[in-house]
Image (spheres, grey):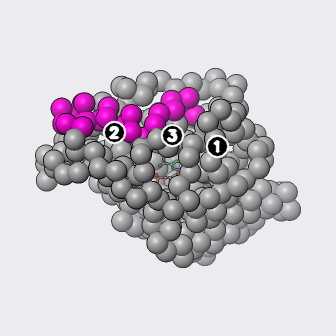
């Protein structure tokens, strides 16, 4: 198979590329990435001789169309996105550009190459938040995004589903819960807690830290995506969760314990505007294909903390 991984120099995309190259050594892997602040090309160093890297923008449909033609791409796995909610609140424009117009460009590519499968990586945030006691969201539930980031992702999903119906392009959408693990940009919640605690600085926690997130170790997510690529159906939506809901404050305290830092570092700060209370997904759509998470939350958190400790001590 010839596979094009867009956004493959970012957090989840880089893990996907590393794992795919190891698991499918006969596949041709092309990685395209705009190299925004969230990317780090060195993540791909272990496989740099086995892949082709192209610096580029998914919104550049001429570049994308010619790349797909030149490399005879069978499948595109799209991780490329603007992803940080707080940044989307400050300035939504880059989010609309990549997460909506970038998707329109990928649709144009797939219309030109109708045999190409597009697996698009979306998010649980498109459903908006849940109250305590609400049932986890399923693929067909209504979209009620709260933040500009989530709204841009929901718009991308809807454009893809409409294009699948109108033009018959081959699309699969996967929506996952919060990922964690090595390679994540320092501004996200878990890296922020680790980074600030290691520097003995105050660890910022929104409101009282009672908001809940459902944590998925990044390599488990990549395995679920491989499952959707191999066994999913065109037009299908897949929701991926490891059923590991935690209050943010509990996660922060776990990290402080692993780092042997005092809880007095925790500093409660003004809440994020529109802050979603809780996310939870029903993962039966991927579990039915045989996927199940392999990395327990505690084990994944330990690996993550150790990785950031290594990176920070090298600096
Ligand atoms: N991290 C999570 O917890 C999480 C949870 C649910 C869904 N997702 C989704 O998974 C995908 C990957 O997330 P991530 O956390 O790895 O993101 P990330 O921000 O770490 O990486 C995004 C990558 O996309 C690249 N990129 C951005 N705009 C681009 C463009 N226009 N053209 C080409 N490349 C571009 C960046 O340079 C970066 O390498 C995103 O679509 C995100 O919405 C992430």
Question: Is label 1 in a helix, a strand or a loop?
Answer: loop
Q: Please state the horizontal and vertical placement of residue 244, each as a whole percent of the image.
A: 51, 30
The disc, 1 or 3, on the residue closer to the chain's N-terminal end is 1
Range covered by the magenta-colored residues: 240-263
Residue 271, above or below 100: above
243 is within the stretch colored magenta: yes
What x and y, as percent, mark residue 86? 45, 63
Disc 3 designates what residue?
212
Q: Does residue 182 show up?
A: yes
Assign a secondary structure to mark 2.
helix
* Front in this rendered view, residue 252 or 63: 252
Q: Quadrant of residue 232?
A: top right
x, y percentage for residue 193? Answer: 30, 46
> Which quadrant holds residue 146?
bottom right
Which residue is tagged 2? 252
> Do the residues bearing badges 2 and 1 touch, measured as CB atoms within 8 Å?
no
For marks 1 and 3, give the CA distance: 10 Å
Q: Is residue 30 left or right of residue 175?
A: left
The residue positioned 86% from the left and 62% from the top of the image is 166
Cβ atoms at labels 1 and 3 below 8 Å apart: no
Task: Give the class, few, some or many, for how many residues have Cα within 10 Å of label 3's Cα (few <14, many ≥20).
Answer: many
Image-based side of 159 in relation to 3, left or right: right
Q: Earlier in the sequence, mark 2 or mark 1?
A: 1
* Closer-to-camera residue (266/229): 266
Query: Residue sitting at 65 percent across and 32 percent down?
Result: 133
């Amino acid at each position: 198979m010839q596979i094009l991984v867009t956004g493959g120099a970012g957090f989840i995309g880089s893990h996907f590329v590393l794992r795919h190259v190891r698991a499918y050594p006969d596949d041709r892997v092309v990685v395209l990435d705009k190299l925004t602040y969230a990317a780090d090309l060195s993540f791909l160093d272990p496989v740099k001789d086995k892949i082709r890297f192209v610096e580029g923008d998914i919104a550049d449909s001429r570049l994308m169309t010619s790349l797909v033609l030149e490399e005879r791409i069978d499948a595109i796995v799209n991780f490329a996105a603007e992803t940080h909610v707080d940044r989307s609140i400050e300035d939504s424009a880059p989010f609309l550009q990549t997460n909506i117009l970038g998707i329109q460009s990928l649709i144009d590519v797939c219309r030109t190459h109708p045999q190409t499968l597009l697996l698009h990586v979306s998010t649980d945030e498109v459903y908006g938040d849940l109250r305590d006691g609400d049932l986890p969201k399923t693929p067909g539930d209504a979209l009620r995004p709260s933040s500009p980031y989530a709204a841009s992702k929901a718009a991308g999903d809807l454009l893809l589903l409409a294009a699948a119906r109108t033009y018959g392009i081959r699309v699969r959408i996967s929506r996952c819960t919060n990922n964690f693990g090595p390679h994540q940009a320092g501004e996200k919640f878990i890296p922020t807690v680790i980074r600030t605690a290691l520097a003995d600085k105050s660890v910022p926690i929104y409101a009282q830290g009672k908001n809940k997130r459902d944590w998925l170790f990044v390599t488990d997510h990549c395995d679920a995506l491989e499952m959707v690529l191999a066994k999913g159906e065109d037009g299908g939506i897949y929701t991926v969760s490891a059923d590991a809901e935690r209050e943010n404050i509990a996660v922060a305290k776990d990290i402080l314990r692993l780092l042997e830092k005092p809880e007095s570092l925790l500093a409660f700060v003004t809440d994020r505007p529109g802050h979603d209370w809780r996310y939870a997904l029903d993962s039966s759509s991927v579990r039915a294909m045989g996927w199940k998470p392999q990395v327990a939350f505690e084990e994944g958190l330990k690996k993550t903390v150790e990785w950031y400790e290594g990176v920070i001590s090298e600096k």
